[in-house]
Amino acid sequence: MRMKCQWEKLTAILPPEIARQLDGRDRENAREIRLRLGAAPEINLGTGRRVLCGQVSQENLTYAINLASKYSPWCAATLAQGYLTAPGGHRIGVCGDGIFRQGQTDGFRSVRSLCIRVARDFPGIGTGLERVSTLIVGAPGWGKTTLLRDLSRQISKQETVSVVDERGELFPQGFETGRHMDILTGVPKPQGVEMVLKTMGPAYIAVDEITSEADCQAMLQAANCGVRLLATAHGAGLSDLRERPMYRRLLEAGVFRQILVLSREQSYRRERVTI
């Protein structure tokens, strides 16, 4: 098994003076690239950080946003939520001077920093895992999305899997999908889950990052319809999830039968859920 990454699509959105400093080590190991106004660009390699030369300018930040979004109206809508999904599935977190109108974020007056998460694919990493409703748990950057992607792909070799890919990160263009897989992008998870339940007849539904009560309610609705769930969440393990009301509700309802807990080394341990 070999890790895959659409590295050229990532470097294409970076200002040339930053992109030319990246090397083979970055291509193989980079987890995220940080661009902060007035500071040196920085790469998180998992085992440490590498600081590049120069200082990030406002023009650098604007350059990256414009190339990542391609001026798409849909991208403008996600930017108002604090992120963009660049070609290749690379997620760009955005911070700066936000605009808040009528109870919701409406964009940014100016951008001060970008966190570019490097999307990687690892075909085969989900081979051999038990085919039950599964929640993948870990810290940011520890490989939750990577494992969810391949587990969904492996299951879809035999059963129908509907992927509700709100941000277009699970299966961006160029990533291998599954034989019996249907992918819905650009729709919030609660509405997306309801849509595929009504129209696609899935045996499994896969979603990335359960973060809200609305997400949880969608998971409960799907489980009550007899559909199995594949999902990710931030957390340290089963005991941690049980202490948080939102996730405890899902566990007590029997939505998930196993928890896969990731480590910093991107390995995992399996915890069986008992009700």
Image (cartoon, grey):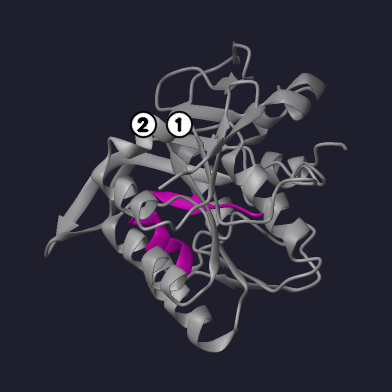
Q: Is residue 88 visible?
A: no
Locate the N terminus by quadrant: top right
Identity of the residue drawn at 49% across and 87% down: 198
Residue 21 in the image: x percent, y percent?
A: 71, 22
Tell me the SS state at disc 2. Answer: helix
User: Is 94 situated above or below 257?
Assistant: above
Write the residue at 63% across / 38% down: 118
Q: What's under tag 2, amino acid-wise?
A: Asp
> Residue 246 placed where, x, y %?
28, 49
In magenta segment, residue 82: yes
- Given the image, on which type of amino acid does mark 1 rest? Gly
Assess whether residue 263 is covered by the magenta stretch.
Answer: no
At label 1, counting other C-alpha atoms closer than 10 Å, the crowd grade (few under 14, some 14-19, many 20 or more) is: some
Q: Which residue is the site of mark 1?
A: 237
Query: To which quarter of the image does residue 172 belong?
Result: bottom right
Direction left: furthest residue: 102
Residue annotated with mark 2: 240
Residue at left offset 64%, top offset 19%:
45
Residue extending furthest right? 1
